[in-house]
Amino acid sequence: MIDPQKNLPSVSVVVPTRGRPEFLRNCLESLIRLDYPREQYEIIVIEDGTESGAKETSEIVRLSPVPVHYLRIPHSGAATARNVGLSRSSKDIVAFIDDDATAIPEWLTRLVSALSSTGVGGAGGRVSPDYPEPVLEAEMLPGGEMKWSGYNSVPPRLQEVDHLPGGNMAFWRKALVEVGGLDAEYTRRGSWREDTDLCVRLRHRGYRLVYDGGARISHRAVRWIGASERFRPGLVWAMTRDDAYFRVKNYGWSGVMGTIREAAKNIKDRIVYGSANFLLISVHLVAWIPGVIHGLRRKDNPQGSLRSE
């Protein structure tokens, strides 16, 4: 862990948000309760195309013992929002957390401690306290395929990884500037794999990335709360396009082949999932009928089923 007697690095915690004020409030409340020295960090909220978080942020500003800044930009996507936060920051370290996440008090302290290791350019941590995996896997395979265990692992020590979770990561600002920040060519709707792209480019520059399972956030994954979101053509198109862009940009022809394999796999998966969902829809349409009939039969005799001796 970091030595509290030494001068600690200054940190900007960047929170991209878009139209989720109730989750943003929870996130900001967790950030102002961090155990990191208050004079050594700030919070920067970047509102991507809406103004729904302005009221929540202004209320937090009045309560916050640390500086909280709010900036609204035209809808541009997560990569641009993060880059704007990076540009606004003049601190030693830039940390990123999603607006639908809450951090434990020691979250930032642990990330800064991990970044203090020799040669480390970026650090990340666990994204959910539920269902931890016994072994962490975070590796990049040929063709741009990601091998990962969901970042729910708690290894006994810092573990070097190929990529970090976008909603829970921190970097030395000078390293981010060196690689030009995040690539804003990813779609603003999908914003898929721009965080992994950043990690790949940092590692190509010789920076190490490490994972600390104790640097934990609770992530609500709001995008997937509505199951129908997975089947929206516009979103599927954006995420598929972003995946292909990431693979080919970083892995060339190997990435092209990886894209083709992934597209074929996704077609098969969507056929299977689509058939399963059609079956579930059919079940939902008819399963209530026997329940209603049975309930009508018992409505005048609602006693329990315990038998007397």
Image (cartoon, helix red, strand yellow):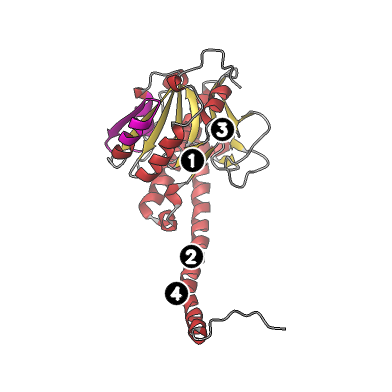
Which residue is tagged 2? 277
User: Mark 2 or 4, which is nearer the eye?
Assistant: 4
User: Mark 2 or 3, which is nearer the eye?
Assistant: 3
Magenta residues? 58-86
Q: Which badge, 4 or 3, comes first in the chain's sequence?
A: 3
User: Mark 1 or 2, which is nearer the eye?
Assistant: 2
Q: Residue at x 49, y 58 (%)?
A: 270
* Label 3: which secondary element: loop
Viewer-proximal residue among 224 and 58 = 58
* Residue 42, picture quadrant: top left
Mark-to-mark CA distance, 2 and 4:
12 Å
User: Mark 1 or 4, which is nearer the eye?
Assistant: 4
Mark-to-mark CA distance, 4 and 3:
44 Å
Numbered label attached to residue 256: 1
Q: Is residue 70 magenta?
A: yes
The N terminus lies in quadrant? top right
Q: Residue at x 46, y 40 (%)?
A: 101
Residue 255 in sight from this viewpoint: yes
Q: Amino acid at mark 3?
A: Ala
Q: Amino acid at mark 4?
A: Leu
Mark-to-mark CA distance, 1 and 4:
42 Å
Percent position (x, y) of residue 292? 47, 81
Q: Which badge, 1 or 4, comes first in the chain's sequence?
A: 1
Percent position (x, y) of residue 172? 48, 21
